[in-house]
Image (cartoon, helix red, strand yellow):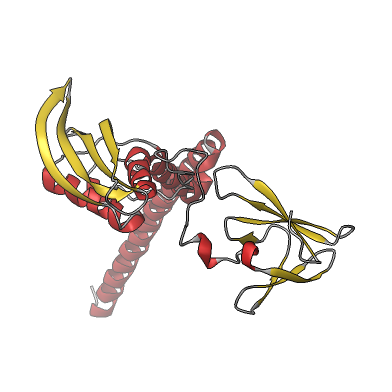
Amino acid sequence: MPYTVRNTIILVVLLLIVIIGTILANANSVRRLEKMRKANKENSEMLEGLKKANPDLENKEKVMQSIENMKRKVLENSKLILKEDTPTLTYQYLVDIADNFCPDVSFNFQISKSGKVKEFSFNTYTISGNADIKSLYFFIFQIEYQSPLYTIESIKIAEQSVAKADTVSFTITLNAYYNEDGTELKNIPFRNFKFTNLRYNPFYSRIHSPISDEYELKFLNIYTSTIIGLTPYKAFLRDNKGRIHTLTPGEKVAYGYLDHINWYKQAAVFMINRIGIPEEEIIYMNGDKL
């Protein structure tokens, strides 16, 4: 067989092998592609089915944010058992309450006993000291309404006759409950809530002789002032130092406020409470008082 013919036959055979191999490879690729397209179609149909059955899947971020908000609200509005309690942890917690909400409350602190109620352990502490009655009320308010489960078992309060006005001595028995499934104190944020202050000192009679109050004396004293002008909506008064004060109804004065202006009688009407009962005080333009 001539050399050229033999080479030609070999080249033709190799070409056929390449062509057949290419056809087989392409056919295999087509089959894999079709298989992938089919799987993708099935997965897409499954995903659509899941979206229809669970429409919230399209709002995953909103759902997760909602869950986080719910967890935060639980922390803010529920009582939580502590994971652990020690005298150091509770003392620091009470100091934080005093520092943040009522800094003039000072106290002595000691552990009295430890015990267990069902699956919950507890420590009992005795807190004693002196404080202004309103600050003590706010201190107790925080213990009661913050999230950690501390229970006040008893309170003893006595008026301090030798101290400044409104100062009392107190002794509080406090229980701190905890178990291993609880929440760590450091992970419980302080709550922010509206607070209604103690309206009066319970050691004082609601009706009493006039009491000098340094806070009230910062405002205009109507008993040492005179009216120098009136409009239907404003009163102009001069105090005993010659300063002019402009008042509108509802505005604060010492021990009370301007209630209204009687334009017909040319008088300013005040509501003043120095003895535990609000009293009406009327000052006329001519200087008369009633």
Place of residue 215 in the rendered image (x, y in percent of width and height, measured from the top left): 48, 61
Image quadrant assignment for residue 101: bottom left
- In the image, residue 2 sits, relative to residue 81, either above or below, namely below
Q: Residue at x 38, y 40 (%)?
A: 145
Q: Is residue 179 left or right of residue 148?
A: left
State the residue in front, 38 or 25.
38
Residue displayed at 37% across by 49% down: 166
Left of 231 or right of it: where is 29? left
Q: Residue at 23% across / 78% down in the picture? A: 3
Q: Quadrant of the N terminus?
A: bottom left
Vertical side of 133 occupied by 180: above or below = above
Q: Quadrant of residue 128?
A: top left
Against 143, residue 253 (above or below) is below
Q: Horizontal and vertical percent for residue 217?
A: 52, 64
Q: How many marks?
A: 0
Determine the residue located farthest toward the right in the rendered image: 264
- The image shows residue 103 at horizontal and vertical percentages of 31, 58
Residue 182 visible in the current orientation: no
Q: Nearer the viewer, residue 13 or 288?
A: 288
Asked whether residue 123 is in view, the answer is yes
Judge left or right: residue 150 versus residue 54.
left
Q: What is the x, y in percent for residue 155?
A: 27, 33
- Residue at the far front in the pictured view: 288
Front in this rendered view, residue 163 or 250: 163
Q: Residue at x 73, y 64 (%)?
A: 248
Q: Nearer the viewer, residue 180 or 211?
A: 211
